[in-house]
Image (cartoon, rainbow, N blue to C red):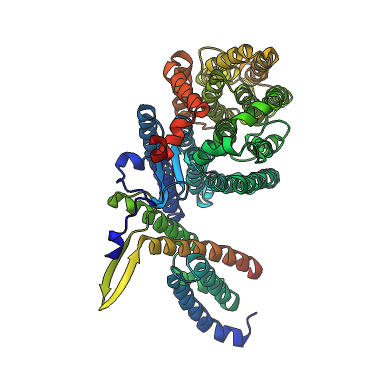
Amino acid sequence: MAAESIDISDAMVIQPTTLGDWMIVAPVGVPILFAAILLMVRHETRLHAGIAITGLLLTLAANAALLLQVLADGPQVMTMGRWLPPFGISFVADALGASLAFVATLVAAVCALYAMKDIGATGRRYGFYPFVMALMAGVGGSFLTGDIFNLYVWFEVFLISSFGLLILGSTERQLDGATKYAILNLVGTTLFLTATAYLYGTFGTLNMADIARRVDAVRDTGPLMTLAVLYLLAFGMKAAAFPVNFWLPASYHTPRIVTAALFGGVLTKVGVYALLRVLVMMFPVERVELSGVIAWVAAGTMVLGIMGALAQSDVRRVLGFVVISGVGVMLAGLALGTEEGLTGTVLYAFHSILAMTALYLLAGVMKELGGSYSLHELGGLYRAYPAMGAFALILMLAVAGLPPASGLWPKILLVQASLESGLPWLALAILATGLLTTIALGRVYILAIWRNRPEGAPSGEPNARPGLGYVSLALLCIPIILLGVYPEPFIRIAETAAAGLLDPSAYIGAVFPVEAAQ
Amino acid sequence: MRTLIFRTVAPYLTSLMILFSVFVLLRGHNEPGGGFIGGLIAASAFAIYGIACGVSPVRRALYFHPMAISGFGLLVSALAGWLSYFFQVPFMTGLWTKVNFLGVPLDLSTVLFFDIGVYLVVLGSITSIALALEEREHG
């Protein structure tokens, strides 16, 4: 054929791909395949859980393989359709993206397990499991893509799936919550798209590595500060940072508890990830300029978030505010911008994904055993179900940042980093948030678990079998405690991720190997 | 809308439109057309049939649930991308081959299968929405 005589090496990837390269695509490709299969067998609701859990475990395995590969050999790249970057869309897995994708898939698999009980045949027929798979494809794509417009597309994929999950059940309250969620997220998405259009107008490329290497040349002429502020606002909205966080408490208490668990664990962290990727890697100078603003936003988010939690009497609403305050803690590392601070942020993201999902699932178990989400009505759970009390204690210690659980180390890192950067008030805010979190969750613990059951409170389901809930909680508590008592390997991963953000030369070199070699 | 004229014409119109949608789909690689617009044309064909003769004949004629068709389309598209694995090229690389079908050379490609997948996704999801709306109107 004539085509074979043409030298394509100038325009196309010519070295053959290996199975290892395919691990970059698998965390997105596998969930899409399984979403398609689940959609085809929509009415065979008995098969759904099995297919979805298989799919998520395969995705998890691919994520694990990818993470190991990234830790061993540095960032991995695959460019779609063979076209060389920046023309082909690259997927780039670095330590940050690969590790977050792994943790997110882990909690999604646990949620799929818990959903076997929480989501009935009707919910499954309305597509709970296909939505979860599509959501995870979107989340995985967001963590692994190396192209900012592609990041927008993956944001849309998981956003649309999350709309579907939010209204599963179609009660009036859910539609109300979903409307607020949808409108406010669409505003954020529009800002994201506008910023991306400006970005393309300035750089003529959307490849993140390409932008990162060219940004210094454009700094004098391009409106980079405008771009950085627009992205800060857009992703801050997605991450539920103060003062654009009001959509989260308005909607996260309405869906099924397992949906709330998945959202509270995973979705806000995608926003935080995008902030890290864009502000630290692509606009480092602008981030320094903005660091004062980000520090105030971070402090406001964590303190006001947790104050909101103190005022609530519905366990799910309490957790919604705890999610927000966790976002504030993560933003503190972004404000500092030092390697230690960013390590703290990444480590806190691991912790927060695990712990928030587990807390929401715990609320689900509490509802099942105690018959209510309201702190006025719950009570006496410790006497009846001591195992649940133990899980609750571990998780509350984790979120409050107390040993022996996972919240301790990231907070130590962040406090240390704030002090070293000369921001003692930020350190104080983090510590005060820890204290207030202890009070807020301690209040839940005392009212729902320790005190005797109040008179006239509703009882739990008569034949409540919390076995599956306990298994799900145990699966999440293992990594949570591991992060607490043996944090070394996790800190090392977070350090690699932070170093990769601060010095993206390895990331850029992986995408453009020829130029890097010159 | 159930006038005699419309009901008589609708089946012919529907079959013509579906035929045309397949033509648009296959034409799409080099000329205007493709899976998305083809899928829309096919979905409007089913919508017209539904308006004229009611929703249940459409559902019977489709045999599979529109959402299942949509799922199958997604599967075809995704698998078209995965096929690259066996040729050691990156995900979603366009792979071409020529086959002789009754003496006529046919260009087959993963791009075509991806487009067929898009066609089915659009057909399935839009038909599903249209039928649900029509059902509510009549029901």
Residue B77 seen anywhere in this rendered image of the structure:
yes
What residue is at 42 percent from the left and 64 percent from the top?
B116
Answer left or right for A175 relative to A40: right
Answer left or right for A316 relative to A95: right
A244 lies above or below B58: above
What residue is at 59 percent from the left and 66 percent from the top?
B130
Q: Quadrant of the N terminus of chain A?
A: bottom left
What residue is at 54 percent from the left and 27 percent from the top?
A349
Q: Position of residue A109 (x, y in %)?
A: 45, 36
Residue A360, image quadrant: top right
What residue is at 47 percent from the left and 39 percent from the top?
A144
B117 lies above or below A195: below
Q: Quadrant of the C terminus of chain A?
A: top left
A137 lies above or below B10: above
Residue nearer the viewer, B35 or A133: B35
Answer left or right for B34 relative to A301: left
Q: Position of residue A332 (x, y in %)?
A: 63, 22
